[in-house]
Amino acid sequence: GFDQTPQQTQTRSMVTKKRIHRQEKRKRWAELAEKGIFPRKPQMYLDKDTPVKNAVPREDRDAESKRQDEVAAAELNAKLEIVKEPNLMRFGFEATGLVMSDRVRKLLDLHNGNQKDVVKSQKKRGMEMFEMREGDTGSSAVQVIALTTR
């Protein structure tokens, strides 16, 4: 005879080594706290009750934020007024300052253009709206417009 021993099965529990270690640590802290010994605080620890120096009150921060929002909204509205051009044309033509017949104007009108012309015009207007200086194509806002209007 050959003796066969039953295979040992590994039992798993929800309590991991890390949890056991944490529980033991808490027990040690509780025992030390009963004796009046408390663990050291971390090196840069600040108590909750420590007053913050040079702090700006929430009302002042909110007022400043609102003021900055109003300035940004005014700038954006000014840019929108500049970019609003009802006479958009195909092939990069602009209707301002050009003298042309009605037939040529209808031919170059964006409503007669294809989808590519319309998207190109929208992209150009959006980039003009958010550019920081003339011909800006590298700033983040302009890049976002360029990528989202494709």
Image: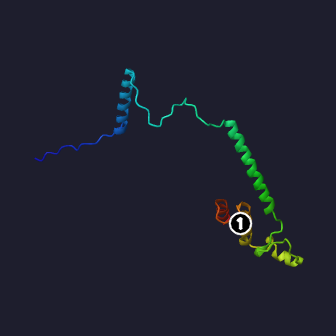
Which residue extends farthest left? Answer: 1
Q: Nearer the viewer, residue 115 or 11?
A: 115
Q: Residue at x 64, y 60 (%)?
A: 140
The residue that appears at 83% across and 65% down in the rendered structure is 86
Mark 1 lies on a secondary structure that is helix
Please give the residue where the numbered disc 1 appears in the rendered image: 123
Position of residue 86 in the picture relative to residue 119 (left or right): right
Q: Residue at x 55, y 30 (%)?
A: 50
| Residue that sits furthest to the top in the current view | 35
Query: For this view, does 108 lie left or right of residue 50?
Result: right
Quarter of the view holding residue 20: top left
State the image coordinates of residue 43 (x, y, percent, origin top left).
Answer: 44, 36
Q: Is residue 31 above or below residue 131?
A: above
In terms of image quadrants, where is residue 99?
bottom right
Q: How many marks?
A: 1
Q: Quadrant of the C terminus?
A: bottom right
The colour style of the image is: rainbow
Question: Residue farthest to the front?
Answer: 54
Q: x%, y% of residue 14?
A: 37, 38
How crowded is the residue under tag 1: few (<14 C-alpha within 10 Å), some, or many (20+)?
Answer: some
Q: Nearer the viewer, residue 53 or 116?
A: 53
Where residue 121 sits, quadrant-wise, is: bottom right
Q: Where residue 57 sits: x, y (%)? A: 66, 35
Which amino acid, mark 1? Answer: Lys
Q: From the viewer's perspective, is 62 left or right of 8?
A: right
